[in-house]
Image: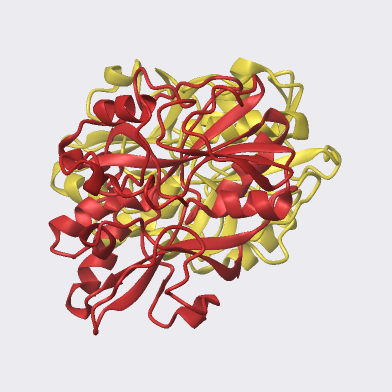
Chain colours: A red, B yellow
Amino acid sequence: MNRTEDRPLILVDEHARAWSPKTARARFRAGLTGPTAGAAAGYTQANLISVPADWAYDMLLFCQRNPKPCPVLDVTDAGSWTTVLAAGADLRTDLPRYRVWRDGELVDEPADVLGHWREDLVSFLIGCSFTFEWALTGAGVPIRHIEQGRNVPMYVTSRQCRPAGRLHGPLVVSMRPVPPEHLAAAIRESSLLPAVHGSPVHCGDPSGLGIDDLAGPDFGDPVDAEADDIPVFWACGVTPQAAVMASRPPFAITHAPGQMFLTDARDEQYRVA
Amino acid sequence: MNRTEDRPLILVDEHARAWSPKTARARFRAGLTGPTAGAAAGYTQANLISVPADWAYDMLLFCQRNPKPCPVLDVTDAGSWTTVLAAGADLRTDLPRYRVWRDGELVDEPADVLGHWREDLVSFLIGCSFTFEWALTGAGVPIRHIEQGRNVPMYVTSRQCRPAGRLHGPLVVSMRPVPPEHLAAAIRESSLLPAVHGSPVHCGDPSGLGIDDLAGPDFGDPVDAEADDIPVFWACGVTPQAAVMASRPPFAITHAPGQMFLTDARDEQYRVA
């Protein structure tokens, strides 16, 4: 990624935390790009993947069979760029940055996809772990990547998702270093929000997920941990992008990792208890 | 329903509570029929709906858009009668009783569907509220329909589900009369199991759901309430059958209301916190 252009919003605009989702979407529509961690406090963030209608059943089934990385918040009708999760939003323009895929290859990374849109695209909005960071912060858990003004680090793991039709691929995770005294709160608070990935899939030694080097994430930025921090891994909504790379559908549009769709849904709306 | 034949299992065999799911499935495969409330304590029960592959996306999307009545536990590949939820099970024979639908009309109610099976059928297993009855019982909540040896009463409501493709139809609910002093426990315990319908959709006056007469359920049996009992309504996995009646797909197979598929999954497996 272009580090200048994609510097986190919290550096671009320290007031991003107080933005409404509508304000955030308007700024992204106007051209602002960058990771969205720390923006629009208390609102649900979503991953995007749009596939041709011919692939929509495979994708929906892939999500049903892999609910930790792919908790579906909404599915649009073919060709529609609106969602019940955000009044007035345009999925073609209102994310900071997109990725465009042909036959599993990344071919463009534009700030809008007006020129790539197709009438047969079905869009999936999938919960994002940035959402539960507010609950973690509220429980006193430090969020290192926000403290350090970076995108969250994400890693392709050695775990395979359960395949669905023509779609297969590895689990992708995000990682947050958590001080031991905050580990219980981090697990407890995220567990209560399964719609945005819920509880971690792994804590501790990254080799348990086949991750060799925490300093070299596959997506996002490396983050500095304190000496006693425990790496905590949550299932990540970039997993469908890994499935696109592995399964090579003819066409797909996704968000750029860490540059999410801001919905009008309060995080509390998805709390289970 | 034939009241002699479909008398609850707890009357047919008072040991049904202690059955393993495998034992229950074997007995149903051998011809035993009847409602499954109270059978195989602690195991997850599931609704079944099988539709032609051409309708599978509409059904999966209908479930995604209506997660309270239609929490999906598993989806089979087309033509398969096995499920990851129960080793060695055969979805064509292992439920007590089935319903067979053509163009939205009920055409048969057999004890197995070997003669109706099609290679293009995709089967959906959807969580059933019988599962959380164990948690309610454990919290001291009386379950009237089990006490009275009846099937749970189910009602078609005036609430419409969110449509998906060609599928639309009303919400169906199950009702349990709950003593006021147990209402909090009933809501709390069921809330923790969203995969089997979770919290109630309504408590109290049935007219709030457009239900005129609690004594005349659309499916199952009427149940006698104590004087102070509050009727509590949970979303019900018979909702896809109401969608079949309203939307008239060319073919479908479902379970008979109250006569569920017994999975090997422990109810605890679906507890969210």
Instruction: Identify the residue at horizontal 65%, vertical 48% (top origin).
Output: A244
Q: Quadrant of residue A93?
A: top left
| Image location (x, y in percent) of residue B180 | 15, 42
Instruction: Identify the residue at horizontal 77%, vertical 39% (top origin).
Output: B121
Instruction: Identify the residue at horizontal 49%, vertical 25% (top origin).
Output: A92
- Where is A221 relative to B109, above or below? below
Q: Quadrant of residue B164?
A: top right
| Image location (x, y in percent) of residue B111 | 73, 44
Q: Quadrant of residue B50?
A: top right
| Image location (x, y in percent) of residue B24 | 62, 61
| Image location (x, y in percent) of residue A80 | 54, 19
Q: Is residue B63 left or right of residue A259?
A: right
Q: How many marks?
A: 0
- Where is A44 relative to B137, above or below? above
Instruction: Identify the residue at horizontal 46%, vertical 63% (top origin).
Output: A173
Q: Is residue B247 left or right of residue B204?
A: right
Residue situated furthest front in the rendering: A4
Instruction: Determine if residue B142 is in view.
Output: no
- Nearer to the camera, B74 or A216: A216
- Where is B51 relative to A208, above or below? above
- Where is B271 relative to B209, above or below? below
Instruction: Determine if residue A77 is in view.
Output: yes
